[in-house]
Image: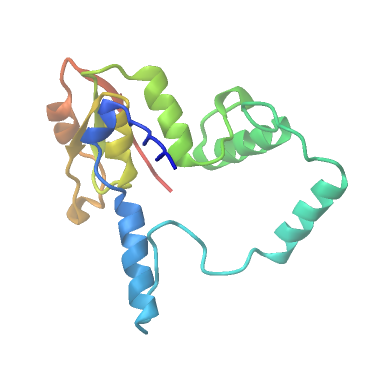
Amino acid sequence: MEEAACLQLAHRMASLQPSATLAMAARAGAMKASGIDVIDLSVGEPDFPTPEHICEAGKAAITAGKTKYTPAAGIPALREAIANDYTRRSGLTVTPAHVIVSNGAKHSLHNIFTAVLNPGDEVIVPTPYWVSYAELIKLAGAKPILVETSIDEDFKLQPAALKSAISPHTRMLLLCSP
């Protein structure tokens, strides 16, 4: 029997680190298996069942035949609700045209980075940050520039620190706020 050939990964994959998220999840799982009480915050998986009203809404949508592909930018009514909520909370004018609904942050960031970044570009990333940011930036051929923040400043990016991180290669500033 002939052995199947292994798929060769792209050379750019060699610069990536293994997933810190999956490593933390594996460690938390091993600790739980050994009897240690662990609150696992690694992969963002809820530790509670889906609320009943959400289950019922999902069932109702399936029964109503809402099982087809949605528009690429997301369901218009959902985009409008998100825009209205953001406008209400922020005081900024946000329209549905400003909103794209995706199947997850990692996928969205990958799409944005590959669409916007070129090799040699830099992305400023304030710390602390989600561990996938740096690897996604590197996958797009760009370089993450980490800018330290501190608890003493409520982890707010300081103007002087931002200014010192900007270079002629800066293409993007990545901000994440709950």
- Between 63 and 123, the one lying in front of the other is 63
Q: Residue at x 27, y 38 (%)?
A: 134
Count of marks, rendered view:
0
- Between 103 and 150, the one lying in front of the other is 103
* Residue 122 rendering spot, x and y as whole percentages: 22, 24
Q: What is the residue that sits farthest to the left in this orientation?
A: 164
In this figure, which colouring scheme has been used for the structure? rainbow
Quarter holding the N terminus? top left
* Residue 53 rendering spot, x and y as whole percentages: 74, 61
Q: Is residue 171 above or below residue 89?
A: above
Q: Residue at x 73, y 34 (%)?
A: 77
Q: What is the residue that sits farthest to the front in this orientation?
A: 1
Q: Residue at x 87, y 49 (%)?
A: 63
* Residue 177 rendering spot, x and y as whole percentages: 39, 44
Answer left or right for 93 relative to 113: right
Q: Is residue 62 above or below residue 147?
A: below
- Between 122 and 26, the one lying in front of the other is 26
- Between 88 and 69, the one lying in front of the other is 69
Q: Quadrant of residue 43?
A: bottom left
Q: What is the residue that sits farthest to the bottom in this orientation?
A: 35
Q: Residue at x 15, y 20 (%)?
A: 167
* Residue 73 rendering spot, x and y as whole percentages: 62, 27
Answer left or right for 73 relative to 4: right
